Image (cartoon, rainbow, N blue to C red):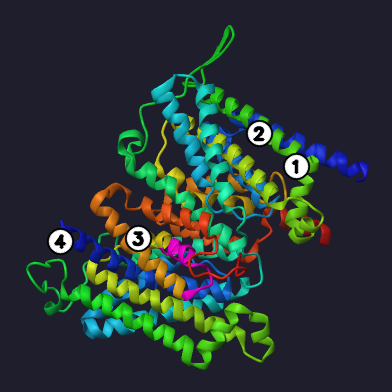
Amino acid sequence: MTQLILFNITNGLITGAFYVLMALGLSLILNLSGVINFAHGGFLAIGGYLAYSLNPYLGFWGALLVSPLLTALLGLAIERGLIRRLYGRDPLYSLLLTFGLAFIFEDGTRFLWGAQGLPVSIPAFMAQPLSLDLFFITGYRLFMVGTVAVAVAGLFAFLRYTRIGVRIRAGTLDLETVSSLGVNIRALRSFNFAVGIFLAGLAGVLAGGQLGLEPTMGTGLLMPSFIAIIVGGVGSLPGTLLGGLLIGVAAGVTTVFFPSASEAVIYIMMAVVLLIRPRGLLGEEGLLT
Amino acid sequence: MRRSEILRGRLILLAIWAVLIGAPYWMPAIGGYTALGTRVLVLGLAAMSLNFLLGFTGVLSFGHAAYFGLGAYGAGLTLKLLAASTPLALLLGTLLGGIAGALLGALIVRRRGVYFAMVTIAFGQVFYFIAFRWNALTGGDDGLRGFARQPLHLGPVTIDILNNAEAFYYFVLACFAVVTAVMAFLLRSPFGHTLLAIRENERRARFLGIPVERHIWLAFTLSCFFISLAGALYAMLNNFADPRGLHYALSGDLVIMAVMGGMRSFWGPLLGAVVFVVLQDYLSSITTNWQSFIGLLFVLVVMFFPRGLLGFLQRRKAAA
């Protein structure tokens, strides 16, 4: 029983790690640009599929780095070409735009790589369980959680210690003032968007190695990521981190006792948070509400 | 308003109803079929219900498919388990979606803008997962089968809406007429004008002493009642209800119908539904990549026709 619970907590942590990567990207974009990026799951899938195609040339490690970068470039192009024109308009329009893009991405990946699921080969030494008792902890799973931790730490360090990072955080609070201080907020938003998409691409590569690739692989992560943001508090990145881990583990633990409710539990958590603390666990009042 | 404008408005209204009433007669001539017409009408009603909130109250709900789907499941389950009665199914379906909307609405009306949209989507998905997971009751992923709409008994007269597609079309049209009349009445009432005031300037409305949250909640709830009636009709149209009828992808479709037609006008969403449903029907018959084209449609509407077809025409006229 202890092993079963441990197993599901580990599973929950790993799912939570994906939620965190996905939700942090979404949150960055939402905070600075006020755009809910429905196409985020599509970017995630593209990241995974690009890694699949790059793998024969660059190997696993090369693909792990290059594929998220390429995905981020695609994101940059789309921000510059389409999304940028919608800043300042009713959020309805950017929502509809990214919604349409999500359709196109999903169908596009299906068209390019086929509807069948594809496996991503991972280095052999990581595929083995570490011990017989803890059969569910493979090297790859540790590696995934470690990579996510490094990426998240890197993101927070970047936002805290670099000039651009500080500007992004300031822009979240008051974009107008940041702009009037002479910061090029168009470039800032583009860069910020690309960072968010990079995280989605990275999540795609990691998820591909664990679960294989499917055109719809990112869509299923979208809703939990929304909930992670709402539970953690809109406008707060640490909140998003907390929210993602929390709902991942909660869903994992629920699987032990009541498997069919593992999806429902995260919605119940959201409802409870909205009832008791509408701004979210670490959210501040007045941001985006 | 000038008298000529009033006259023009009445003529347009007359034309819309003439087209709708005549649809079973002129549609086959241009390659349509009656069930497609009924589908347009039902989804048009759904888009108009959503637009009651989106266009006239200025609140962005992206989870309205949930209430549409609840209406569908409510009607289907009534027919399957309770009683073989079309009016009862319609009533219970509408109540199920409407009451769910009223309860959840109370939880989310304090949010605004993107945040409101996010919360409505997320809550909408709850019902998707319930329908998807509760196999015993809902049939899970396969959908709810094993029910059929029943002939109407009006005193001595029996109308066979089950086997006669035209008769069912007119039944749906009658429901459509009642709901749109109620909507138009509400929008013309002081309540409707208050909603417009909230849309135009929420802060000002609040300073004038209007209880904004209560109005938005009422608009949300009414819109949920309307759309779940449309959902109940949809289940009876197909004699089938499935989880995709609750999914946020359908919410997106409904929003794009409203925007594409013109969300500032009463009939705009119906026009959007006509274009969307016919296009989807046609595209899915000629290509397997129809999803990309629908996605492209979203992008094009947002980039080039943000005011919708009717808004575009009105602006052209104003400029001329």
Give the mark, 2 or 1, whose residue is nearer the N terminus: 2
Identify which residue, A117 or A10, lies in the foreground: A10
Q: Secondary structure at mark 3?
A: loop
Give the alpha-carbon distance from disc 2 to disc 1, as whole Å.
Answer: 12 Å
Residue B187 numbered mark, or none: 1
Within 10 Å of disc 2 (Cα), the crowding (few <14, some 14-19, many 20+) is: many
Tags 4 and 1 in contact by the CB under 8 Å rule? Answer: no
Residue A216 numbered mark, or none: 3
Q: Amino acid at mark 2?
A: Val
Residue A58 numbered mark, or none: none
Chain label for disc 1:
B
Chain label for disc 3:
A
Give the alpha-carbon distance from disc 2 to disc 4, as whole Å.
Answer: 57 Å
Q: Secondary structure at mark 2?
A: helix
Give the alpha-carbon distance from disc 4 to disc 1, as whole Å.
Answer: 60 Å
Q: Residue at x 52, y 66 (%)?
A: A36
Residue corresponding to mark 4: A3
Left or right for B291, reference B306: left
Residue corresponding to mark 2: B179
